[in-house]
Image (cartoon, rainbow, N blue to C red):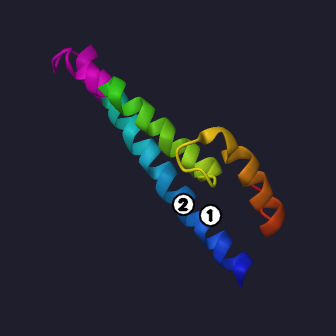
Amino acid sequence: MERGLAMLWLVIRRLLCFSMTLLLWGGAVYMGYLVLTRTASPSLLWWCAGLLPFGYIFLHLGLYGAGYKRYDWSEDKSVHAERKRRYGWRW
């Protein structure tokens, strides 16, 4: 039961986080395209620069999840490796 719920949480978390990453990075690319084709103001590039780090945050959370310390990313990979062993995740 615990393994099944953990796998369900992993799939849902990755689906949502990767979708948000694609949405944010796709929006940044689209805004960059609008600026390059001169249909939008160059000040829109500031929004692009703001969207890219948020996309990375969602990518990191989708890959590794959050560790025990929510605001410290240094332990996320080790906690994810521990959860992979515990629940038998391959990815």
Query: x, y (%) of residue 25?
Result: 41, 35
The verdict on residue 35 being magenta is yes
Left or right of 30: which side holds 64?
right
34, 51: nearer the viewer? 51
The residue segment tinted magenta is 31-47
**Residue 83 makes an appearance in the image:** yes
31, 11: nearer the viewer? 11
Helix or strand or loop: what does disc 1 sit on? helix
Q: Which mark, by number, is residue 74?
A: none
Query: In the picture shown, does residue 17 fall above or below 30?
Result: below
**Residue 90 makes an appearance in the image:** no
Query: x, y (%) of residue 9?
Result: 59, 69
Q: Residue furthest front?
A: 69
**Crowding near pointer 1: few (<14 within 10 Å), some, many (20+)?**
some
Q: Which mark, by number, is residue 10?
A: 1
The residue that label 2 is drawn on is: 13
Query: In the picture shown, does residue 25 fall above or below 8?
Result: above
The reply to whether dot 1 and dot 2 touch (C-beta < 8 Å) is: yes
Figure quadrant of the C terminus: bottom right
23, 76: nearer the viewer? 76
| Amino acid, disc 1 | Leu
Left or right of 11: which side holds 31?
left
